[in-house]
Each structure stands twice: as structure tokens, then as C-alpha cells.
Image: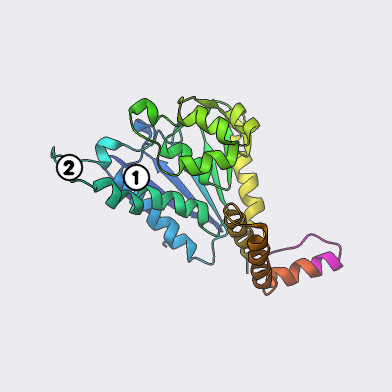
């Protein structure tokens, strides 16, 4: 990945910028509240796929330009077929390699992902925030799953993410009743990590990113993987997964540094390897 790359069309872009060991991904379509079109989704997928293989990266920051994070998928832009009715099965063929792949990458990439949310986080925008490891939202943020209000069933991982984060009862309120959730309620429910004043949002996200980027990157990635695995595994299976992850993490230089720092009664200085 180049030091700074931007992929854009006339309708919007995603900017990927290296900031030391942090990759900052910005949804840049503020006139449409950063609603995602097909090219933006493809650009995010490419950037995350490259990041997964980049040993110099240690954290990812996802944010939106302007006053809003993301107002969902732009169905006019992503489903344009020249006025013709899409072929039967079009969504079944296409979505797994687009929106669904994007959610999977955010959720499973073995780098910590921090999401900053201002204004609206709607539909897939909401689910991107839920799939991140940590989401920090401004007090003016609103999380909304409007699928039923639009006449179609939920997608982009909402039926999997929400019950695990807030329980089935609250998931029903968001998915079946279309209730909007304020940032304060989202933090209270455990839907997001933290709420901050709008002026303090960037500082709150950066503090978290710097902490994560300074951590033992391999162990963090393995811990994230084990947490995800444990959501659908038995205790015995999770213990076995933890054991293999422990075997890997104990072979890193960060493990040696952690032990040495403990012996010397000082803070460790991890290099992510």
C-alpha cells in the first residue's frame, strides 16, 4: 500500500492514509452523508485486505468526513442496472463479495479497529460501527437500523451483531421496530465503547488508537480472533483455541519484552512483532 492513496469517482471516495503504524480510512462523500456506493465498498475491501498483510500496521481508524459517519448504502448507486430489472439472484451473487465481505473484514482482521461516529450511523454504517472493536461516538450521534422501515429485511450482519452486543430484546427494538438509538443509550447498552463531546471525539479516538498501536499486535490479533471464535464455540473448544493462540503469542518478541518489563518493574515497549 502506498503512503497515501485515494480512490474516487464523481460521487464519492474513500481515502486511505498511513499515520505511522495507524491506517486511517475516511469515508469521503459528505454531501450524501457518506452513504456507500459500490466503488467505495470495493475500495474499503481492497484497503483492509492490503492492511491484513502489512506487518508495519498496528491499528486501523475508520471515520467519516463532515458531520456524519455513514448514512448506509446508496441503493441508487449500488444497484444501477441501466433501468433494467436486475437478474433473479443478483443480490445473492453480489452482496457476499461486497457489503458482507466488508463487515467480515472489519470484524475479523487481526488488527484492532477503532471507529469514530458523528451524526448518523445508519444501516451498513451502523453495522460497520458495531463490527469494529471499539466505537467512540459523539453525543450527537444516532444509530439506526432502518431496514424494516424501507420494506426489506435486515442485512450486513445486523441480525448477528446486535443480539451479541445488546441482547435479543433490544435487537428486536432496533430491527423490528426501527428504533433510533442515541449515543448515550448506545454506550449504556454496550453497543459502543465510549461517548464523547463532539469537540473531544478525535482526541478520544486517538488516545485509544495510540494505546492499541503501542500494544503487542500479534497477541491483540489472537485475542480478537479468540473472542470471535468463542461466540459460537463450547467452553472446551474455546480453551483449545486459547491454547494454540497462547503457543503462538509466546513465540513473539513482544512476549519476551513483556516478561523483561515485568522483571524490571517498568512499562513494556512493544514493537508489534
User: Can the viewer see residue 62?
Assistant: yes
Numbered label attached to residue 81:
2
Quick one: label 2 or label 1, which is nearer the N terminus?
A: 1
Horizontal side of residue 185 vs 94, given as left or right: right
What secondary structure is marked by label 1? Answer: strand
Q: Mark 2: few, some, or many residues within 10 Å (few <14, many ≥20)?
A: few
User: Can the viewer see residue 8?
Assistant: no
* Residue 222 location (% of width, % of height): 61, 62
Numbered label attached to residue 35:
none
Which quarter of the figure is the C terminus placed in?
A: bottom right
Instruction: State the image quarter where residue 71 is shown.
Output: top left
Numbered label attached to residue 13:
1
- Point out the stretch of residues depicted in magenta: 260-273
* Residue 209 location (% of width, % of height): 61, 49
- Is residue 37 positioned above or below 188 on the image? below
- Give whichever of 35, 203 is nearer the camera: 35
- Give whichever of 252, 7 is nearer the camera: 252
Amino acid at each position: 500500500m502506498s503512503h497515501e492513496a485515494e480512490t474516487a469517482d464523481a460521487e464519492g471516495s474513500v481515502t486511505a492514509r498511513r499515520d505511522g503504524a495507524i491506517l486511517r480510512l475516511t469515508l469521503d462523500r459528505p454531501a450524501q452523508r457518506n452513504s456507500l456506493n459500490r466503488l467505495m465498498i470495493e475500495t474499503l475491501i481492497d484497503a483492509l485486505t492490503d492492511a491484513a498483510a502489512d506487518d508495519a500496521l498496528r491499528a486501523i481508524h475508520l471515520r467519516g468526513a463532515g458531520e456524519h459517519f455513514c448514512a448506509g448504502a446508496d441503493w441508487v448507486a449500488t444497484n444501477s442496472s441501466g433501468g433494467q430489472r436486475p437478474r433473479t439472484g443478483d443480490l445473492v451473487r453480489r452482496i457476499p463479495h461486497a457489503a458482507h465481505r466488508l463487515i467480515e473484514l472489519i470484524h475479523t482482521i487481526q488488527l484492532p479497529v477503532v471507529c469514530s461516529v458523528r451524526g448518523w450511523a445508519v444501516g451498513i454504517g451502523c453495522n460497520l460501527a458495531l463490527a469494529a472493536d471499539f466505537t467512540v461516538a459523539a453525543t450527537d450521534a444516532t444509530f439506526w437500523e432502518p431496514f424494516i422501515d424501507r420494506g426489506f429485511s435486515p442485512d450486513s450482519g445486523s441480525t448477528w451483531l446486535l443480539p451479541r452486543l445488546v441482547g435479543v430484546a433490544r435487537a428486536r427494538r432496533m430491527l423490528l421496530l426501527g428504533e433510533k438509538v442515541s449515543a448515550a443509550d448506545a454506550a449504556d447498552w454496550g453497543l459502543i465503547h465510549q461517548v464523547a463531546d463532539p469537540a473531544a471525539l478525535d482526541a478520544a479516538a486517538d488516545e485509544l488508537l495510540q494505546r492499541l498501536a503501542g500494544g503487542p499486535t500479534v497477541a491483540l490479533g489472537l485475542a480478537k480472533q479468540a473472542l470471535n471464535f468463542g461466540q459460537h464455540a463450547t467452553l472446551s473448544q474455546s480453551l483449545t483455541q486459547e491454547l494454540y493462540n497462547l503457543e503462538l503469542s509466546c513465540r513473539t518478541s513482544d512476549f519476551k519484552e513483556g516478561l523483561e518489563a515485568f522483571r524490571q518493574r517498568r512499562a513494556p515497549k512493544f514493537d508489534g512483532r
